[in-house]
Amino acid sequence: MIYSQKANPNATDSELDAKRIVYPDYRGIPDCDLAVSLTEDQISTILYVLEGYMQGNDDDELVQEMDEIFEKLETVVDNHHDMLEDLCKDIKDIPYNEFDDPLM
């Protein structure tokens, strides 16, 4: 005996849904910032690559997205440099007395 079956031409929605692959909907999950540890050289490399890729790219939406990433990374590096400059100024303001230096 050969078994054969034809699809129901008047299938209900529930029958059609049963035959569809259901993928999770990630659109409801908010995009959040992630804590990432990168060196200044690594960030500089990423900025260099982004800048090169953005030049001559005609996908305006992608260029805008890369520009936002570029700005965030550049701001992090600038803030780091500002913090280092402030730290160096604070150290320069401390009077140095060689007699108080424990290494001398």
Image: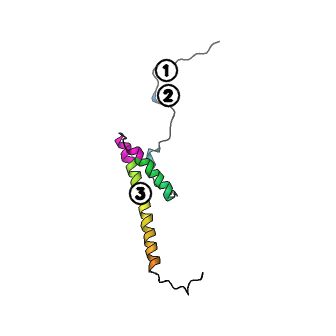
User: Mark 2 Cα within 10 Å, few/some/many (few <14, many 20+)?
Assistant: few
Q: Are marks 1 and 2 in contact (CB under 8 Å)?
A: yes
Closer to the camera in the image, 34 or 8: 34
Residue found at x 41% / y 62% = 78
**Residue at mark 3:** 74
Which labelled disc corresponds to residue 8?
Answer: 1
**Residue at mark 2:** 15
Q: Position of residue 96 (x, y in %)?
A: 50, 83
Q: What residue type is disc 1 on?
A: Asn
Closer to the camera in the image, 95 or 90: 95
Residue 31 in sight here: no
User: Mark 1 Cα within 10 Å, few/some/many (few <14, many 20+)?
Assistant: few
Q: What residue type is disc 2 on?
A: Glu
**Which comes before the other along the chain, label 1 or label 2?**
1
Question: Does the magenta portion include 66?
Answer: no
Quadrant of the frame with the C terminus: bottom right
User: Mark 3 Cα within 10 Å, few/some/many (few <14, many 20+)?
Assistant: some
Instruction: Please tell me whether residue 23 is drawn above or below residue 94 in the rendered image.
Output: above
Using the numbered discs, state the Cα–Cα distance from disc 3 to disc 2 in whole angstroms: 53 Å
Using the numbered discs, state the Cα–Cα distance from disc 1 to disc 2 in whole angstroms: 9 Å
* Quadrant in the picture for residue 98: bottom right
Residue found at x 48% / y 52% = 45
User: Element at badge 3?
Assistant: helix
Q: Which residues are magenta?
A: 52-65
Q: Residue furthest right?
A: 1
Q: Are marks 3 and 2 in contact (CB under 8 Å)?
A: no
Instruction: Please tell me whether residue 89 is drawn above or below residue 6 in the rendered image.
Output: below
